[in-house]
Structure formats: C-alpha cells, structure tokens
Image (tube, rainbow, N blue to C red):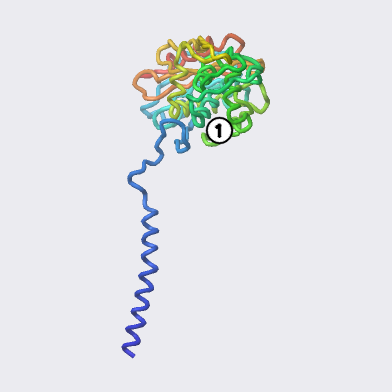
Amino acid sequence: MKKSLIIIISIIFVGLFFILIPLAKRGENLLPNPGKKEGSLREEGGSEEQKIKILGSILESNETDSILPSRNLKEPSPILGEDAGIAVLFTRDFNGNILYQKNIDKKLPIASLTKLMTAMIVIDKYPLEKEIIVSQEDIWTEGESGRLSPGEKISIRNLLYLSLLVSSNDAAAALARVIGEKKFVELMNEKVKEIGLLNTNFSNPHGLDDKENFSTAKDLAILTQYSLLNYPSLWEILKIKEIDLFSQDYLKRQIVHHVRNTNTLLSQVGVLGGKTGYTEEAKDTMILAATAPGKIKGNIILVVLGVEVGERITKTKILYDWVCQAWRWE
C-alpha cells in the first residue's frame, strides 16, 4: 500500500513538472523587453509613430501651464478672408494647442497641399535614385507643369523636388504611375488612417479638383506636424529656395530644370518650410511651418485655405506675424 502511494505521488509530481515549465516559459514572453523603446519615432516614415492631437484653444487650457504662451489682447485677431484657417503650437509632447482658428473642421478642396501626402508615400515606398521615363499621359496632366517632356529620363528624387517646390502636377502623376495611380491613392488613404486624420480623403496624387479629394485646416495641421517629425528629408526639400535638377531627353541629351520654390516666405525668421497650392475650386492655399519663438520648444503650423488668387503668401505672412505679436513667447 505504501509503495503504491509513493508511485502515485511520483506520477503527480512528474505531470505537474511538464505542465508548469511550458507555462513559465510563456510567461517570460509576456514580460516587456527592456531593450525596446515604446512609442519611439522612426527617422523616416514607418507605422509606430505617436498620435498627434490638437487639444483645443490655449485660452481654454490650464492657465498655470508654464509651457504655453499668453495672449496679448491688445492685438486683435487678423481678418484674412479665408474659407478656413488655423495656427497651432505643437509642443514636444505631441499635443497641439490652437492659437488661431476659423472653420477648422470644414471639408474643403486643398489643391497642391495634397502633394505633402504624395511625397510621404514616395519616401516610404520608392528608391529615390531610380530613374523613370516620363510618359505623354503624365505631360497631359492639367495644371502646373514642371516642363517635363515625353521620353524624358529623370530620377524619382528630382520628380519629388519638382512636385514639392513648383507644384508640378505632371511630376506627381509620373510618381504615382510607377505603381499605378489607383494603388498609390490607396496608400495615401491608408496613411490617412494611420495618422488618425478624421476628415481627409485623397482621390489623386496632385490635388486637382475632385469632390473626393478634400481635407480640413485641422487635419492638415496634424499632417504637417506628422511629416515634420517623421519625414525630415521632405522638409530638407521644402526649405530649398532654388536648385538645378538634371535629366536626359530621349536622345540622351542633358536637360536642366532650374527650379524656384513657390514659397517665398523662407527668409522669414524661424520658418522651416511650407507648401503652396491653387486650383479654381480651392483658390489659393498654403501651409507654413516654423519654430516657436522665445523659450518654448515646439513648432508653429499655419494652414490657410481658400484665399483669393495671389493672396496666399500675403495672408499667410499676416497670420504668421500676428501669431508672433499677439502671443507673448517669453
């Protein structure tokens, strides 16, 4: 009897051993990896970026928050005559506070501001040094032209420069054609969801008028800040005032594209870069990014949508000057 009891106890012990050891190993896999940094940002693109949020007006925020500027009420709000606009201070904690706003959630056509997203997809998916041949179909794209020629051999990098600096619609069309415009636009809208933009949709890579190609001032501010944090090479392009770009025609003769940035506010103190746009329906549009003045660590993003033709630079500068003067930054 005693011998039988010992055998039974031994069998139970062995069974428990084989059950508990695998569970312990699985438990080890659930422990956090001390070498992995949660929520870290990748240098260029990727899908692990922190979500950027706009919390609301600074006037509605905690008045004791020492990182926020204070309003100088002697400076009245500017009258820009825009369809929508916003100025946002984004601080290092990924949160944004509104300095100026008008119709910030109104869905509007955005013209070539679309190309900011186009550039992000190109940087994500393409080898920038690869050369492609420009097609006649690309050249037929309506609107702004990079003066490309059918049969021209040009690098993806140089097409990106043309798209961003002079809003070349044919360059944007050529970039999308590498993988097919339908697939390219799908990637653009996947990125919209990844970033968390609630009122944005893209239907083309260049921003020509289409009822399914729209965004809001608020979404564009978030998109701009997101690109600043995750696509530094994009902003290296946007801060270029002028540049010569080289390609070859179908006879292998050199072509030189002398490009001047359509954003003429680059010489303003603190400005990091920006993007301009125009279509008949969208009218003039613009985004501008700058470092926050004074001791505050962060960026100011301005978005102006739907101002009269020829006024995008003037009205954006008025808003930028107002932000610097109507808020105390020291």
Quadrant containing the C terminus in the rendered view:
top left
**Residue 204 spot, x, y in % from top left:** 63, 26
Find residue 92 and report its image quarter.
top left
Q: Residue at x 35, y 18 (%)?
A: 294
Q: How many marks?
A: 1
- 175 relative to 137 in the view: left or right: left
- Please tell me how crowded label 1 is: few (under 14), some (14-19), or many (20+) other residues with Cα within 10 Å: some
- Name the residue located 34 percent from the left edge and 83 percent from the top edge: 7
Residue furthest toward the bottom?
1
Seen as rendered, the residue at the extreme front is: 251
In this rendered view, identify the residue nearer to me: 326 or 167.
Answer: 167
Foreground pick, 288 / 256: 256
Name the side, left or right, on which 308 lies relative to 292.
Answer: right
Q: What amino acid is at disc 1?
A: Val
Q: Position of residue 186 (x, y in %)?
A: 60, 34
Residue at 61% x, 29% y is: 202
Image vertical order of residue 134 relative to residue 196, above or below: above
Q: Nearer the viewer, residue 246 or 4?
A: 246
**Which residue occupies 38% across, 58% down?**
27
Residue 264 x, y percent position in the rendering = 49, 10
Instruction: Name the secondary structure under disc 1.
Output: helix
Please state, as top left, top right, bottom left or bottom right, where the N terminus lies in the image: bottom left
Say left or right for 123 vs 173.
left
Q: Nearer the viewer, residue 2 or 75?
A: 2
Q: Which residue is mark 1?
A: 192
Coordinates of residue 93 in the picture (x, y in percent): 40, 32
